[in-house]
Image: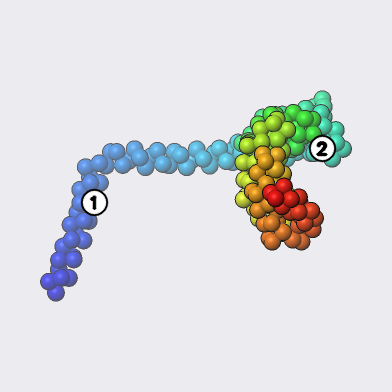
Amino acid sequence: MAEKKEETINIDETVHKVEDYVQENRKSLLIIAGAAIAVLVGYFAYSNFWVKPAEESAQKEIFAAQQYFKMDSIDLAINGKGKEKGFKQIADQYSSSNTGNLANYYLGVLYMKKGQFQNAIDALKKYDAEDDITGAMALGLMGDAYMELGNNDEALTYYKKAVGYDNNEFTAPLFMRKSAFTYELQGKWSEALDMYKKIQSDYSASTEGREIGKYIARAQAMIK
């Protein structure tokens, strides 16, 4: 009974301390509560009166750019035509929307096609991946862009990021092979061989896995 009484006293003591704190800091707490409510109201208004309408407008306006993309009309897809907006305008104007975010991915791909590799990197860095495949592809494309710019170290960094982003049968072996090629360019044949062997063991059914034997043989020959 003594233990129970002591426990009750301790709990009551805590409750009293909380009550005292609330009374002493009532004004401050009211200000904090008011600020929290203001934030919630602000977020609700921002989501419903800005983000949602912007998303709806962006989805309508991106259609023309996507059609130009399918037609491989690179400049029109980037810059638009007349009243039709290109991916560049959509990415800038609707940056807070999911569609504006996706426009950055399209821009990265298009700049790669134009050979504007730094522009491609800048666009792809703004892209917040909506799924694992495009996330891995965006990282791998940045690796390709750095490779084209002669920065093999950064290229390897992004190839590895692409591999680690999602271990699927499509992107992982592709960028593992590119990582191995980069190691070869750096004269790191042992690292390249390890990467090739990993493709063989983990992704033997992939396109890269089916032809990996010749690369393993080449790396082994260079090491010897």
Does any portion of residue 78 appear in the rendered image?
A: no
Which numbered circle lies on residue 69? 2
Question: Crowding at label 1, few (<14), some or many (≥20) Cα neighbours within 10 Å?
Answer: few
Q: Position of residue 58 (x, y in %)?
A: 71, 37
**What residue appears at the point 79 percent right and 53 percent down from the top-left corner?**
214
On screen, 171 above or below 74? Answer: below
Q: Is residue 21 left or right of residue 111?
A: left
Colour scheme = rainbow
Q: Secondary structure at mark 2?
A: helix
| Quadrant (top left/top right/bottom left/bottom right) for the N terminus | bottom left
Amino acid type, mark 2:
Phe
On screen, 50 above or below 134? Answer: above
**What residue appears at the point 87 percent right and 37 percent down from the top-left corner?**
71
Q: Position of residue 91 (x, y in %)?
A: 68, 33
> Residue furthest toward the bottom?
1
Q: Which residue is under mark 1?
A: 18
On screen, 90 above or below 179? Answer: above
Q: Which one is nearer the viewer's eye here, 114 or 193?
A: 193
> Residue furthest toward the right?
71
Q: Secondary structure at mark 1?
A: helix
